[in-house]
Each structure stands twice: as structure tokens, then as C-alpha cells.
Amino acid sequence: MANHLERAVVVLAAGAGTRMKSDRQKTLHEIGGRSMLSHSLHAAAGVHPNYLVAVVGHQREQVAPAVDTIAAQLGVEIRQAVQEEQNGTGHAVQVALSAIPDFNGTVVVTNGDVPLLRSETIGALVDAHESQGAAVTVLSLEFDNPTGYGRIIRDADGAVTEIVEEKDASDEQRRVREVNSGVFAFDGAVLRDALTRINTDNAQGELYITDVLGIARGDGKKVAAFTAPDPRELAGVNDRVQLAAAGKELNRRLVEQAMRAGATVIDPATTWIGVEVEIGRDVVIHPNTQLWGSTVIGDGAEIGPDTTLNDMEIGARAKVVRTQGELGVIGEDASVGPFTYIRPGTELGARGKLGGFVESKNAKIGEGSKVPHLTYIGDATVGVESNIGASSVFANYDGVNKHHTTIGNYCRTGSDTMFVAPVTVGDGAYTGAGTVLTKDVPPGALAVKEGRQRNIEGWVEEHRPGTEAAEAARKAREQG
Ligand code: UD1
Ligand code: MG
């Protein structure tokens, strides 16, 4: 292939998307944890164009800031062209070109509502277009049911002559199953010229980008079609049913990617993985597991079943069972669950444990330390190899302010200890069961509360006569 030309990618996102029945602009709806617009712009940026242009219009008070955020994430400039009135796809591209007035290289046009289109496919389209020296190349699809799409019309020699919209097509043209995906590569100069010659003389009274093909062909230029290798990539989203279908297809792709990279996924149908999630080798993912945000799963970790993790970092070989977790870090070989709620700021050290019915928040728990049962641990630091007894509460909130609890290394705190923060337990210290800890415990001490147990003999028979308890007590007393 010759030196490639300069490239620009235009993403159309000005439409109203009325079928979504939403207050949110259509392309801002999400699949795989990312907006459709963001998927489209990621794919566009993936071909490293010299210019990236987003055409915004409808609800641009939402779309424009979203484009800016995506540009910052991608670290690229995205120019925005405002299409005040949506006079058709041809008009939208005219508006886009006004944002890159001196550009005459290859112009790719794609849509903000085609979230599954991959960079590789855009790249293959551009390569085919440039290597054939075409003036226009349309990315085409074959559909058994082409209803609603523009048909690709070819002459007797099989050369593409024009695209005819469904509403403008003859019965014979409607029988054509090769359709326009809405994605094109154009010679910039040909496009600029042809866009001055399109008109609204069609069934919808709009300026059609598709008319550029017929004009270029009429001028004797080469017009080509490049068949998309996988038509599923071109599925457009116009309503929420299609949104769910696209989300499922994206997920199928992401789950497959994880498996190809060495993860075992027991049930792909109930496993959901966001686009930014990273999954290591020999990870096992059990059914009903959802991994979202920037979650990272270390090699050999085992996740699920019934687990949802958002922005979590899971160390190698850790086990996380029936857990809801967000913005926490779980160390290597650590164990979490079942029925554990991990809130932001939790850091569990290597070999540590957060067991059943434990809730944690803003808690740094050292290597080998365990919080095994029925505990709330919040605003706390725990050293290494300490054990927090069952049913403990870190009482961190005095009704106005949050306070911190610090527990040293090798501590053993008894069941049902209340850590009334701020409080510190020194290295190697113990607490007795049921201790309400309001004062610091020095290293190596045993903290107990002296409220002594008193047994009032005969209380049940006297105060609860006739009950089964009183009867059982009488029998036990008589048997001596
Ligand atoms: C278009 C194509 C059709 C193709 C189909 C593929 C035309 C005339 N027709 O039809 O051949 O098979 O896509 O899905 O191009 N948009 C704007 N401004 C406008 C109009 C549209 O930004 O003034 C954007 C829309 O937001 C959308 C895209 O362009 O992202 C396509 O527009 P749409 O109205 O959906 O075109 P279709 O009728 O689907
Ligand atoms: Mg459409």
C-alpha cells in the first residue's frame, strides 16, 4: 500500500433518537459500562486519524460536555460541529467538513449509535478504499431482511452505481439485500464537491449523504463497497430493545475475550464484564457475576457466584464469593464472602479475610488479618495477623463526626466487641467478649468491662409461672 493519506473521522450524533423515549440523548445511553457515543469515538480514535469530528445537535447541552470528557479520556482532540437543524445525513457531513475546512485526505463517516463497530473494521474499510484508489467506499452488509436500510445498487458488471433509500426505492430495488451500513470512506475533495450538488429531491425531503455515491459515479469516479466481515458490528441502536441486544452482543465479545486470555467462565450467559475490566490468567468466574468499571482481577483468582464488583482490584489467587464490592482492594490469597459488602476505601491485605455478613468501609486491614463473621468495620486500620471476633462493630460515627479505630498487630479481639472510636488497641492486645471499648488498650493487655454477671435464682418460676420455661426449670431443680 502507498503512503496512507491524511485521515479524518466524522461521527454523526446530532439526531433526536425519539424511539428511545428518554430525557437522555440517544448516544449517551450505555452498554458495557460506556456510552454508545464513547464506544463510537473510541473506535474512531483507534484508527489514529489526523482529525476527529463529532457532529452534535439535539440535546447538545448533554452531548457536548460528554464529547469533551471522552476526548480527555482518550487524550485526543475531538472537534465539535454543531448541526442546528437536522436536515439529513448529507447536511450533517457538510457541517462536519466546516470544522476541518482545509482537509482533503480520506474522510470516514460513521454514526454515534453503532456502538459495536470496531477500529479494526474502520481500518480495513480505509485500507480497502485507499488501496483501490476509490473516490467512495461504502461499508456494506448482507441482510435477509433489509427493510429500512438504503440499498446498494450495482450495474450489470457488478460495479456500485448508487445507494437508494428504502422510501425512494422501486419494488425491484427493494429486493436487493445488500445494504448501506451508514459507514463510508470518502476522498475528501470528491466529498466536498459532491456535497455542494446534493438536493432534497427525495421522499424525506432531506440532504442524503448516500447521494454522494451516485454523483461521484456520474463524474466517472470509482465507487466501491467493502463488505463488513461481521454484520453484528453494524447493529444500529434506535430503541431500548436494540440497546439491550447490542449490550448482550458486546458482553458476548468481552466474555469471549476473557476466556481466550485464559479465564474460565462457567456461565457466559450470566457473566457481565465491562469494557475496561482486566482479567488475568487462570481466573475462574462463577455464574451471576458482574465486573464493572476499572475492576482488575489478578491471576488465579476465583470470583462468584452472585458477585458484583465495581472498580475493585482483586489480588492473585484471592477468592470472592457472593459479594457486592466497590472501590476496594483485595490482597493476594485473601478470602471474601459469602454475603460480604465491601464499600469504598476497603483494603484487605494478602491472606486476609472478610467473612460472611461483614460490611467494610474505609478500612485498611493488614496481611493475614481476619474479620470472619457478622461485623461492621469502618474507618479503621488493622495491623497484621490480627483477628476480629464475631459480631463486632466499629462504632465510627458519633452522630456528627466520623472517628478512626486503630488496631495493632497480632491482636485477638473478643466476640461482640464495640470499638467506640476514636480508640486504639496496641500490638498483641486482647479484648473480652462483649467489651464496649471506650478507652485505648495498651500493647499486650486484656480489656474487659467489669459489669459483673449476677444470677437471680428462681426468677423464672416466680415471674413466669405456668410457662414451658418455668416447667423445665422446676423439673431441672427437682432432679437436683
Ligand atoms: C441511514 C442511511 C441508510 C442506511 C442507514 C444505516 C441516509 C440517507 N440513509 O438511514 O442508507 O442504510 O442509515 O443505519 O444516510 N444524523 C445527523 N443529522 C441529521 C440526520 C441524521 O446527525 O440531520 C445522524 C443520526 O443521528 C444517526 C445517523 O446520522 O446517527 C443516521 O441517521 P438516520 O436518520 O438514522 O438515517 P437512517 O434513516 O437510518
Ligand atoms: Mg438510523
Image (cartoon, rainbow, N blue to C red):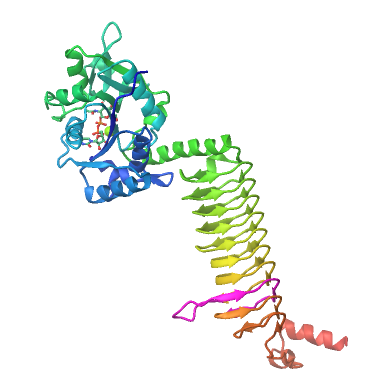
Residue 417 on the magenta span: yes
| Residue 341 in view | yes
Q: Residue at x 73, y 81 (%)?
A: 468
* Residue 109 visible in the snapshot: no
Magenta-colored span: 395-420
Position of 14 relative to 235 (above/below): below
**Residue 241 or residue 421, whichever sits in front:** 421
On the image, the x and y values in percent for residue 417 come to: 64, 78
Q: Residue at x 58, y 46 (%)?
A: 287
Nearer to us in this view, 159 or 153: 159
Q: Nearer the viewer, residue 138 or 22?
A: 138
Q: Residue at x 37, y 44 (%)?
A: 74
55 horizontally vs 408: left or right: left
Residue 104 on image: x %, y %: 21, 27
Q: Position of residue 185 (x, y in %)?
A: 29, 25
- Indicate the quadrant containing the C terminus: top left, top right, bottom left or bottom right: bottom right
Identity of the residue furthest to the front in this view: 3
For residue 382, what is the image quadrant? bottom right
